[in-house]
Image (tube, rainbow, N blue to C red):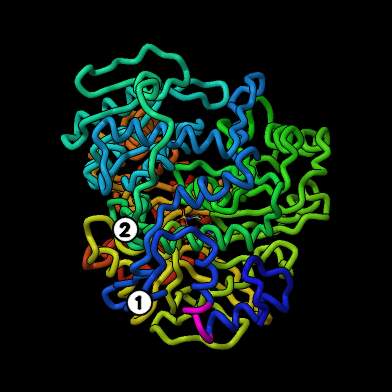
Amino acid sequence: MSTDHSRIRSWHEHRSAYQASLDDPGSFWAAQAERFKWHRKWDEVLEWDFEGPQVKWFSGGRLNITENCLDRHLDDRGRSTAIIWEPNDPKEKALRLTYHELHERVCRYANMLKRNGVTKGDRVCVYMPMVPDLLIAVLACARIGAVHSVVFCGFSAQSLADRINDASAKVVLCSDGMFRGAKEMPVKSVVDEALSHCACVERVLVTRRVGWDVAMDPARDRWAHDELAEVNVFCEAEVMDSEDPLFILYTSGSTGKPKGVVHTCGGYMVYADYSFRNVFQYDPGQVFWCTADVGWITGHSYMAYGPLLAGATQVMFEGVPTWPDPSRFWQIVDKHRVNIFYTAPTAIRSLMACGLDPVLDHDLHSLKVLGTVGEPINEEAWHWYKDHIGKGRCPIVDTWWQTETGGIMISSLAGVTDERPGHAAYPLPGIQPVLLTPEGEEITENEVEGLLCIRFPWPSMLRTTWGDHERCRQTYFSAFKGMYFTGDGARRDADGRYRIIGRVDDVINVSGHRFGTAEIESAINEAKGVVESAVVGYPHEIKGQGIYAYVITEGPVSDPEEMRGRVLEAVTAGIGKIARPDKIQLVSGLPKTRSGKIMRRILRKIAEGELDKLGDTSTLLDPTVVDEIKGGRL
Ligand code: 7RM
């Protein structure tokens, strides 16, 4: 086997690295871990048991991830650009931060956190738009060993409050407001509303972005710029244990309440860097741009951590793809000479719908590698991306992974492994996927479909769900003995490439964002006049999946539009605008079994328009509701 552990550069190396990772996982991952600065080397590479589950990587090792993201690069790359921040408004000047400057700003911010009572192990909730302080805040938490919990700014006050309470966060970091395309939107006032339901928060630190005169509680709130003026520019990094928690990130599952996925320091660091360098084949000096928000796992692993661990230069964009016009992404690619561009299929589809004119004004010659993440990519979008953005000369990496996996698990490596539209392709060396039948039988042949599981640990896997380890066991490790169950179904082609089909549980993936049907239903049920609801996903041209809600109301509704408006408001308040149903059908009953279970399969078929494929409905409590629902289909 090749002894160059820096990067896999050929199909042959991929095969031999894969084999080596199977033969001796300990040596394989130890070699990756050697790249970093450790205050103390690990005693054991891996200890594991999927029953507990109890998984430890690099135990006994001591490190700080920000020393590896920042300090480690200062001698060689201190003056090279770490972040190019492109503001919402193209007329506002972009901000460039070198590794030196980013290091200094993280240290200052970390000292501000300390000055405001944050210590190792405390949970800090970060609720900020895509401004440099968001990234700085995340790294500052990691610097002092505080556990960050980033909540995407599109979530409502209610969901923010739930997440703050679940983690018992002591401090909230936010901004006054945010710019999003042509709009200005509140942030601090959302935090204020959330905090009326949270007793745990002692301090709120506010970054000024839009310049609003927001309400400040003198006992609780401070402006970040005032506090930052009081602190030192150097902050010693807190030395952490490999298995100390690094962050919590909430994600939706099939049950009502989002789970706080916990990632730990050592393993997450090793895998974020390993996967970033290998999948994107990043070369020093190149410009990387991941369009995801730091509020999602993609923004954690491929903005906050992976690229910085690799010493990369990257773009961080505050705005939206369609403002001031649908050429904004391509303008930015040309302006900052982006080499590697990583986005979601939903963004590609929505830009594809705007036609070629916005693309043709830009030469895009800097692009070398394209990537997608978050949902299956349909062939039409794949080819459009390949031909019109990549001009036929850029490899596309279709990266499959999850909040829980921490990093990319199945993907081709740019220009190294071949690609097939719609296929995430091969597991990265070190990753052992399996396909199972619903009965838990392993399917070993190719050209088959099954439930996607992972049979062996990898360094960035989740360790627990915050405050509820049993829930972690139940959700991921109990369906099939000795396996991590992903919740996805997949196909394996004749050459062993994987194609991810989608969720097999009650999770809907809307524009690459996960929502549980139960979570949306409980928000809908809060609306006045709603008795019960059932939510399913259906194919949506742009979003991948749309949300279809069937809602039972109290008695007949005189004004259906007003009722639908109430449902939308309830979802906006309970979760956020991003989870609003695309279709709301008012019904008098739902198809239920005699035991009272809602037959979602039938509702899904109706939403998909496959009215002749409902199957046997005779066992339903009241088969006549099906005809009514079919008749009223939207
Ligand atoms: C990174 C992220 C995870 C779910 C996952 C899948 C779906 C993600 C792909 C994909 C097909 C892909 N984390 N998914 N990537 N499906 N091809 N390349 O998205 O936790 O928010 O979502 O997303 O269903 O289970 S996530």
Q: Which residue is drawn at 53% across and 50% down?
A: 72
Q: Mark 2 points at which residue?
A: 244
Q: How crowded is mark 2: few (under 14 residues within 10 Å), some or many (20 or more)?
A: some
Say which of 546 and 291 sits in front. 291
Does ligand 1 reach within 8 Å of label 1's beta carbon?
A: no
Say which of 623 and 58 sits in front. 58
Q: Which residue is drawn at 38% across and 43% down?
A: 236
* Residue 625 in sight from this viewpoint: no
Q: Residue furthest front?
A: 75
| Residue 315 position by quadrant | top right
Q: Distance between the residues labelled 2 and 1?
A: 15 Å
Q: Does the magenta stretch include residue 24?
A: yes
**Numbered label attached to residue 47:** 1
Task: Tally the marks.
Answer: 2
The picture places residue 379, in percent across and down from the top left corner, at 70, 59
Q: Which residue lies furthest to the left in this view?
A: 199
Magenta-colored span: 23-27
The picture places residue 385, in percent across and down from the top left corner, at 73, 50
What secondary structure prevails in the magenta region?
Answer: helix
